[in-house]
Image (cartoon, grey):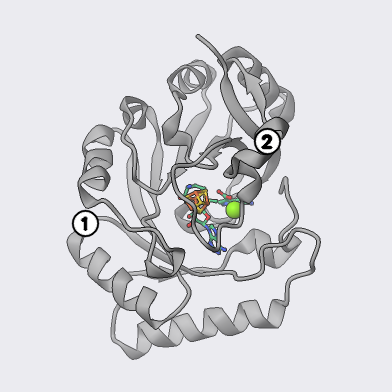
Amino acid sequence: MTGLRIAEIFGPTIQGEGALIGEPTVFIRAGGCDYRCSWCDSPHAVDSVHRGDWAVMTPDQIWARVRELTGGRPLTVSISGGNPAIQDFGQVIARGWTEGYRFACETQGSVARKWFADLDMLVLSPKPPSSGETVDWTAFDACLAAAGTGPQMVMKIVIFDDLDYDWAKAAAARYPALPLYLQPGNPETDPDTPVDLQACIDRLHWLVEKVTGDGWFAPRVLPQLHVLIWGNKRGV
Ligand SMILES: C[S@@+](CC[C@H](N)C(=O)[O-])C[C@H]1O[C@@H](n2cnc3c(N)ncnc32)[C@H](O)[C@@H]1O
Ligand SMILES: Nc1nc2[nH]cc(C(=O)O)c2c(=O)[nH]1
Ligand code: SF4
Ligand SMILES: [Mg+2]
């Protein structure tokens, strides 16, 4: 097969978001995305202007790098992007499985893939109105169907404002069986500018009060732990 477009492979670090927060992991960040979220924190893996910085790697080369970073000790590998679902990660997952590694994938749920069924964790992150994108729920449902009973599945929604919050409630109502994680949106995404930690806490505070004040007890509200630790630094 030809190679996969890879923006970066880094770690071990900790998963900073959602259901696996705090868990040691290595990230494979795929290059290329079918969305253009206004507030995307990873534009270096999205915009084709950065394409020249992406590596084209075979599954063997990707796997060799993951083994090098982990010293061959199995952990959960997080496949993110960009949207990793526009490429075929089946062979990478198959390599890792034989060595006892586990796989989580982060995707917006716009493209379904057979290899979703081989994951341990599928994180679906449908985009609220502030992103400027519109969710195709038929495509989202196809992602759930492709994953089947293979991985654990969760929904993680980024919230910037009241409109996003109301949208998240409606999205959650569509999928009552999916565990739900909410994280405040981070408007500061420049890797070279230090984040305002108090502002991060204030946004978290706002979201916690929305949820508890509403008597909405289904979601878990979490910060982006990596942002609290490292700001918007890349490769962590
Ligand atoms: C960069 S995306 C890559 C994976 C996939 N394209 C997606 O959006 O799910 C990884 C996660 O970061 C979240 N994210 C992106 N920009 C963010 C921001 N400015 N603040 C908070 N979360 C953000 C996305 O919603 C997604 O859950
Ligand atoms: N530590 C850490 N945790 C993360 N969780 C999701 C991330 C992503 O950009 O997909 C991410 C990331 O880039 N770093
Ligand atoms: S879908 Fe994910 S990677 Fe693509 S633009 Fe939106 S946040 Fe960024
Ligand atoms: Mg990120």
Q: Position of residue 207 (x, y in %)?
A: 46, 81
Amino acid at the residue labelled 1:
Ala
Which residue is farthest bottom? 213
Direction from residue 152 to residue 22 in the image, left or right: right
Q: Estimate the spatial distance between the alpha carbons at disc 2 and disc 1, rounded to whole Å.
A: 33 Å
Image mark for residue 8 = 2
Direction from residue 113 to residue 20 in the image, left or right: right
39 above or below 94? below
**Which quadrant holds residue 171?**
bottom left
Q: Position of residue 203 (x, y in %)?
A: 55, 81
Q: Position of residue 94 (x, y in %)?
A: 45, 17
Residue visible at 34% across and 46% down in the picture: 109
Q: Position of residue 233 (x, y in %)?
A: 75, 55
**Which quadrant holds residue 135?**
bottom left
Q: How many marks?
A: 2
**Marked residue nearer the N-terminal end (2 or 1):** 2
Mark 1 residue's CB less than 8 Å from ligand 1? no
**Which quadrant holds residue 126?**
bottom left
> Which secondary structure lies at badge 1?
loop
130 above or below 47? below
Q: Nearer the viewer, residue 2 or 155?
A: 2
Image mark for residue 177 = 1
